[in-house]
Image: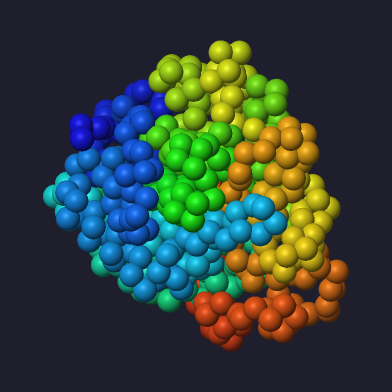
Amino acid sequence: MSNLFYTSTRGKSAKQSSAGAILSGIASDGGLYVPDPLPLDSLDPLEIVNKSYQEIALVVMAEYFTDFSDADLKACIDLAYLNTFDTPHIAPLVKRDDVYYLELFHGPTLAFKDVALTILPHLMKQAARMSGTDREIVILTATSGDTGKAALEGFAGVEGTKIIVFFPEHGVTQIQKRQMVTQHGENAYVIGIEGNFDDAQAGVKAIFTDPALSAKLYQSNYMFSSANSINIGRLVPQIVYYFFAYTQLLRSGEIKRDEPIDYVVPTGNFGNILAAYYAKQLGLPVNRLICASNENRVLFDFFTSGTYDKNRDFVMTMSPSMDILVSGNLERLLYHASDDDSASVRQMMDRLNLTGRFDISPIMREALSDFYAGFATEEETSQSIKQVYESSGYLIDPHTAVGHAVYSGYREKTQNPTKAVIVSTASPFKFTASVMKALGRDYKADDFELIDILSRETGLSVPTPLVKLATEPVRHRKICRKEEMKKQVLEILGIS
Ligand SMILES: *Cc1c(COP(=O)(O)O)cnc(C)c1O
């Protein structure tokens, strides 16, 4: 395997090894690190068809993290996936009504982000060892609800790290909030902000790219990194389950060798679906990457018109982890689709900063033809939850339901018979209020009481991480304005 490097999408930062890119999180020019060269067609699913999830993880990660030894990667994989998920398969695939659901919610926080955030702390510690740094790593994270808790779980108690999470005080569900504000761990800090996810993400990005602040930090023997999907260490572990799902379909005879399938991905910050795109580049037979948005349909508009425009009202939906108007990882796709043209990526991102919008060229649009985009209204999302449950007894969460609704529209419109996997991103128990309402059972009860009611009505058992959540003591109460994020961080680190 040849050595690869990580280069900034904006082309103004030095290339890094994967360890360097994982430690930095974001490039100093504000760009995102992309593999250079992007691994192409080097993994045939037939070669890994009989491997376990962990074994596939090793093969896939070795393609991207070429400076890590296999022994080091294996150690990280074992630490991440041994006994942290409620199934040894990590990402089980289930079939209902002729579609497949890839269940990514069997980890400690019941959403797909666990798959990457259980391993990221170990990759980061290893990266720190490899680069010989003894600095304390400060993880700064903006969350639309699920990343925060998954990152807290991953980093809490990890020696040599601190984790600070900013979440939109009024933009997450009761359950998501409670999961975060009850977090244990001396090194964990959770702060609500008066703003939405985009504000939180912009604030974190501004802190990361503030040179004066970096210098201060450096003097105090700290370094920043990110647990958001702008970190390549988040993205690569997500490529694994796209291969794993395909091998399961091959093994069970549901598909023939080389048969292309569709992946339907409920999308917000564009990390998960970008991992699917990387999987396709690496050699996975994928027909369409179906990008499913909720009423914040900025990506749908982008793919169908060639114009990205965030100037619109932010809608709070029942799929809050997808309530995003600036999809950070799209920048990586723009880089690949423009044939690695960092100058034009820079231009597009400058325009986005300045005017809130940018256009892409017809040639670039052509390069995005692997993608199909759709969006689901709140009504359609509810309908999907109800319909899937009534026809097959299978309960899906609102994010997955957005995927289902978009997929139904796609099937109707294209009559395309390709087999499809819908990526199931969260447990329905995380979003009880919306799920119960969709089922037409409108109780006057809070989200926590609804956990037990939902369990009783469906016969499904309450996932372990939620059993004691309602009675856990609140440990984090801080709220700040979005302008105060930097001040909060300095206070926590004891830097003036
Ligand atoms: C984060 C999240 C998404 C969106 O994933 P992106 O990688 O941000 O596109 C979808 N569903 C759930 C449940 C999530 O937590």
Q: Position of residue 61 (x, y in %)?
A: 30, 46
* Left or right, residue 231 beside residue 430: left
Q: Tell me what residue is drawn at x 33 percent, y 48 percent.
A: 48
The C terminus lies in quadrant = bottom left
The N terminus lies in quadrant = top left
Q: Is residue 281 above or below residue 226?
A: above
Q: Position of residue 320 (x, y in %)?
A: 66, 55
Q: Position of residue 143 (x, y in %)?
A: 54, 55
Q: Tell me what residue is drawn at x 72 percent, y 84 percent.
A: 456
Foreground: 84 or 144? Answer: 84
Most extreme residue toward the left is 132
Q: Position of residue 220 (x, y in %)?
A: 25, 54
The picture quadrant where one finds residue 398 is bottom right
The picture quadrant where one finds residue 96 is bottom right
* Left or right, residue 317 beside residue 93: right
* Left or right, residue 131 beside residue 358: left
Q: Tell me what residue is drawn at x 36 percent, y 38 percent.
A: 44
Q: Is residue 458 above or below residue 119?
A: below
- Is residue 28 shown to the viewer in this render? no
Foreground: 410 or 168? Answer: 410
Foreground: 356 or 244? Answer: 244
* Left or right, residue 253 beside residue 355: left
Q: Tell me what residue is drawn at x 73 percent, y 58 percent.
A: 318
